[in-house]
Image (tube, grey):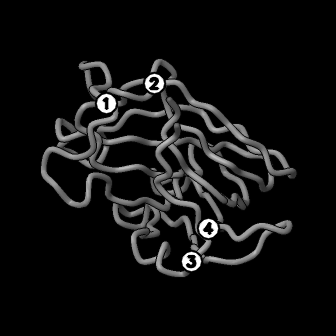
Amino acid sequence: MPLILDDFSRSASLVRWTCFTDQVMGGVSRGTMSLAPVNGQQALRLRGTVSLENNGGFVQMARQLGDGRADGLDARAFKGIVLTVCGEPGSYYVHLRTSDTRAPWQYYAAPLPVTRSWTDVALPWERFSPASLRAPLDVARLVRLGVVAAQAAFEADVAVARIALAP
């Protein structure tokens, strides 16, 4: 049975999420996050302009995992993550952070294909590659999940209706 992390059916889901851009490090990308109906489903929507100027290049919405515990969420009983997504195709990723990731540029990333129709996208743990890390992903200590528009200059528009850990 999947473990639902968010289904965005209630406005309370929004308070767990934050939106930020490369402006935290001098970039000029802009982005917003909202909870709204998209193509008939209630969803968390990330929109913005991803710019590569000033060494930038991302817009992100993210949430903590593990109810704020330092050791995070133990996801070893699951095979990966499944997101129900739709939007404008672009350069999107799911980022995971563990209790081992210390610097903001350290994370594990998997490409997130997005189409204009609602689609369930399954991302097995093996698809996540380390960025600025040598250690493989340790799913026993997941502390943060992000949906990111990055690595290309484009108009981002991605909506997420559900996020779950897949058995």
Q: CA distance from mark 4 to mark 3?
A: 11 Å
Instruction: For marks 1 and 3, give the one nearer the viewer.
Output: 3
71 relative to 33 in the view: left or right: left
Residue bearing the label numbered 2? 125
Checking the image for residue 139, the label placed there is: 1
35 relative to 137 in the view: left or right: right
**Local crowd at mark 3 within 10 Å, few (<14), some, or many (≥20)?**
few
First in sequence, mark 2 or 1: give its number: 2
Check contact, mark 4 vs mark 1: CB within 8 A. no
Image coordinates of residue 154 in percent, x first then y, are 71, 54
Residue bearing the label numbered 3? 10
Check contact, mark 2 vs mark 1: CB within 8 A. yes
Q: Is residue 80 above or below residue 89?
A: above
Q: CA distance from mark 4 to mark 1?
A: 24 Å
First in sequence, mark 4 or 1: give its number: 4
Residue at the bottom extreme, as displayed: 11
Q: Amino acid at mark 1?
A: Val
Image coordinates of residue 2 in percent, x first then y, are 52, 40
**Local crowd at mark 2 within 10 Å, few (<14), some, or many (≥20)?**
many
**Local crowd at mark 1 within 10 Å, few (<14), some, or many (≥20)?**
many
Q: Is residue 150 above or below residue 13?
A: above
**Residue ID at (61%, 55%):** 162
- Visible in this render: residue 156? no
Checking the image for residue 46, the label placed there is: none
Check contact, mark 1 vs mark 3: CB within 8 A. no
Q: Amino acid at mark 2?
A: Trp
Q: CA distance from mark 2 to mark 1?
A: 8 Å
In-front residue for pair 121/47: 121
Residue bearing the label numbered 4? 44
In-front residue for pair 140/86: 140
76 relative to 103 in the view: left or right: right
